[in-house]
Image (cartoon, grey):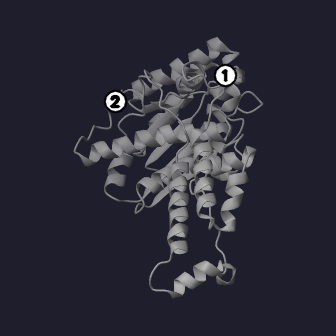
Amino acid sequence: MRFAFPFRSISGRSLCAVAALVLLAPLSVVPLCAQTGQADQHAALSSGAKTEAARPDAAKPAAVEADAANPQPGVAAKALDKVKQVAKSASDIFHRVPCHQPTGVPNSTGSLPHVAAKLAAGKPVVIIAFGSSSTQGYGSSAPEFTYPSRLAAQLRRQYPSADITVLNRGKGGEDAPEMMKRLQTEVLDMHPDMVIWQVGTNAVLRNLDPSETAKQVEDGVARIQADGADIVLVDPQYSPRVTERPESARGMVKLLGRIAALRHVGIFPRFEVMRDWHEKQAIPIDDFVIADGLHMNDWGYACFAQLLGDDIIRSVGAIKIGVNVPSDVRTYRPM
């Protein structure tokens, strides 16, 4: 069964249908009706998909100009307003991809008390996405479709008055040994409120010693905690290049889970989330992984960011209603 993108197709058809009925849609709506392939995916993933382009006054239809001079809205103006309302609705839908939360995945990102309290209070927040190529965004079609960019857009929509900065500190090919060398300058020196540390995939692919990886990650987590930031570890992706090494992959997932429990930090179970997409939601692998069999595509990054952002938003909601979980206590709840 192929995975469908219902918001993209249905919203596009409904918008075009309304435009056709009223016969007054601006010319800039037409490309939306004709979009296919990669252009469709960009429209569905864009955090602010546009269906109308700015046009000079001289290019306005004559009927609209006549109605603008009339204090009583004409039929044409009312119809055009209807088209614009539908376009706005489509844009709102495009903010989220058709991505369902997995059921029965027990781990979550935890309580995130530090960043949640600052967002709830309206204070500036700095989040650092630290990791390798899947943090850097390899496989995405544009910088705005990487997971850190998608996460930033989601949080800014949720908290429009907040000053939110999400810094992408991903570097392809690295794992814990290389990341630890730049931890101080690219993470700690920024004094972030939250660090999302994606690690372990290249350790599996490069057959690195798991015990050495564990020591390095635990040391890094301790240093980040000492700086006062919330931490969420992100384990390897469920993709062919990783799952072809099943013992190493399972071992890395367990290793990071043990560190998270030991250090009382959050963990985003990316491996189990992506496996749920394929095994329980029947989404073909190539619908969220690119041809190299390793990196996610635009949809995969968007869904990953969306679920992670939802957890952060829930933590802020808990802080606002007075459920302030101490930073040394992890919470476990279904995603």
Pinpoint residue 188: horizontal percent, then vertical percent.
51, 48
Q: Tell me, for residue 266, which label it has, or none.
A: none
- Residue 179's spot in the image, x, y percent? 62, 38
Q: Secondary structure at mark 2?
A: loop
Picture quarter with the N terminus: top right
Which structural element holds mark 1? Answer: helix
**Could one spot residue 50 in this view of the protein?**
no
- Name which residue type carries label 1: Val
What residue sits 37% from the left and 53% below the top? 119
Mark 1 Cα-neighbour bin, 10 Å: few <14, some 14–19, many ≥20: many
Position of 171 with respect to 252 (left or right) is right
**Disc 1 target residue:** 204
Residue 267 to residue 10: above or below: above
- Can you give x and y, in whole percent of width and height, for residue 52 in the image? 62, 65
Most distant residue in the right direction: 291
Residue at mark 2 to residue at mark 1: CA–CA distance: 28 Å
Q: How many marks?
A: 2
At x 68%, y 15%, the residue is 245
Which of the two discs, 2 and 1, sits closer to the camera? 2
The residue at which mark 2 appears reads as 331
For badge 2, the amino acid type reads Thr
> Where does residue 117 sit, x and y in percent of width and height?
32, 50
Image quadrant where residue 2 sits: top right
Residue reaching furthest to the bottom: 69
- Identify the residue at image location x=62%, y=24%: 238
Q: Is residue 209 left or right of residue 224?
A: right
